[in-house]
C-alpha cells in the first residue's frame, strides 16, 4: 500500500551529494505521501522537491499528472518542513481567489 502511494505520487529515492533523500513533486506532497514514507521506514530521510533547484536535471523527468507549483510557493513550502502542503494549498487558494476577483472585475467593465 505504501509503495503504491509513493509510486502514484512519483516519489523517488535518490542520492544527492552522497546523501539519501526522498524526492517528491511539490504539487503531490501531502499527508498520504508522508504517511507512506513513515510506513516504509523512510520518514527520517530528508524530503527534497524534485522541481526544486537542488535536484539534478536527470531526476526532473515527470511521469505523474499535475504541474509543479510556482517558484515562490515552492520556496514557502521548503521554509515550512512540518506540513508544507498546507502552505502550498493556502497560497494557491489565495491566488485562485484573486484570479476570480480579477475575472469578475473584467466582466463588470464590459
Image (tube, grey):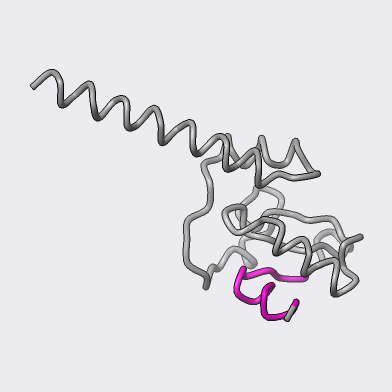
Q: Of residues 106 and 60, which is closer to you in this image?
A: 106
Q: Residue at x 72, y 41 (%)?
A: 78
As drawn, which residue projects farthest toward the top?
A: 109
Q: Residue at x 77, y 61 (%)?
A: 34
x%, y% of residue 14? 78, 68
Q: Residue at x 41, y 36 (%)?
A: 96
Name which quarter of the figure residue 83 lies in: top right
x%, y% of residue 36? 77, 69
Rendered position, 40 above or below 87: below
Q: Please, what is the dominant secondary structure of the magenta stretch?
A: helix
Q: Of residues 22 and 105, which is closer to you in this image?
A: 105
x%, y% of residue 73? 58, 38
Q: Of residues 61 and 63, which is closer to you in this image?
A: 63
Name the side, left or right, on which 99 lies relative to 78.
left
Name which quarter of the figure residue 99 lies in: top left
Quadrant containing the N terminus is bottom right
x%, y% of residue 61? 55, 68
Quadrant containing the C terminus is top left
Residue 4 in magenta stretch = yes
Name the side, left or right, on which 69 lies relative to 38.
left
Name the side, left or right, on which 66 lies relative to 36.
left
Rendered position, 77 above or below 56: above
Residue 98 in magenta stretch = no
Residues in magenta, as a range: 2-13
Q: Residue at x 80, y 44 (%)?
A: 82
Amino acid at each position: 500500500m505504501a509503495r503504491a502511494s509513493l509510486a502514484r505520487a512519483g516519489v523517488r529515492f535518490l542520492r544527492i551529494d552522497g546523501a539519501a533523500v526522498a524526492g517528491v513533486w511539490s504539487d503531490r506532497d501531502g499527508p498520504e505521501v508522508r504517511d507512506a514514507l513513515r510506513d516504509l521506514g523512510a520518514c527520517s530521510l530528508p524530503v527534497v522537491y524534485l522541481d526544486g533547484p537542488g535536484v539534478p536535471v536527470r531526476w526532473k523527468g515527470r511521469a505523474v499528472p499535475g504541474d509543479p507549483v510556482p517558484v515562490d510557493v515552492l520556496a514557502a513550502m521548503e521554509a515550512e518542513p512540518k506540513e508544507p502542503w498546507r502552505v502550498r494549498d493556502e497560497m494557491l487558494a489565495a491566488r485562485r481567489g484573486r484570479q476570480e476577483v480579477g475575472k469578475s472585475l473584467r466582466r463588470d467593465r464590459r
